[in-house]
Image (spheres, rainbow, N blue to C red):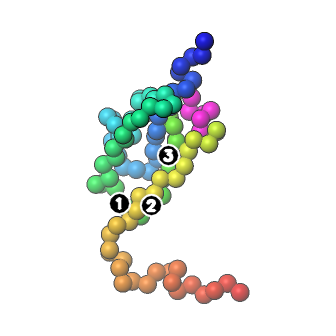
Amino acid sequence: MMDEGCGLTNLHTHGLHVSPAGNSDNGMLSFMSGDVFDYEFDLSLHPGGNLNFHHPHRHGNTAEQLLGGMAGALEVADETTALAGIRTHTENQEPCL
Ligand SMILES: [Cu+2]
């Protein structure tokens, strides 16, 4: 008989300024393969335009799942128009010859 704890997983983020409770970045949640769950991250205090990181954080399974590839980037888009109309460094780059 297989220990069900081995298949449990969840989601943890790095870089986001969000709550560690409820259905947000809560490392105490656990799910089995096939479970459906809606995470909610309140990004109202988090600036956009940055790249963050996510991985499973179920105690006892984290290392095996992380090293198995269950991790990735989590982009928060910059939806502001603060730099609209300003040329960026990428537009000014000289071509590499
Ligand atoms: Cu971590």
Write down the residue under mark 3: 54
* SS assignment for the magenta stretch, majority: helix
Q: Earlier in the sequence, mark 3 or mark 1?
A: 1
Quadrant where the N terminus sits is top right
Relative to 97, residue 28 above or below: above
Which residue lies at the image location 63% right of the left edge and 86% below the top edge?
Answer: 95
Q: Is residue 63 magenta?
A: yes
45 left or right of 53 in image? left
Task: Check disc 2 and give the amino acid type.
Answer: Asn
Q: Which residue is mark 2?
A: 50
Location of residue 7 by image quarter: top right
| Separation (CA) of disc 2 from disc 1 | 8 Å
Q: Position of residue 82 (x, y in %)?
A: 32, 75
| Cβ atoms under marks 2 and 1 closer than 8 Å | yes
Question: Is 8 located above or below residue 2 in the figure?
Answer: below
Q: Which residue is mark 1?
A: 47
Is label 3 in a helix, a strand or a loop?
strand
Say what amino acid the circle numbered 3 marks.
His
Image coordinates for residue 64, horizontal then vertical, percent: 62, 32
Residue numbers of the magenta segment: 60-66
**Eyeballing the image, is 67 above or below 3?**
below
Label 3 with label 2: CB-CB less than 8 Å: no
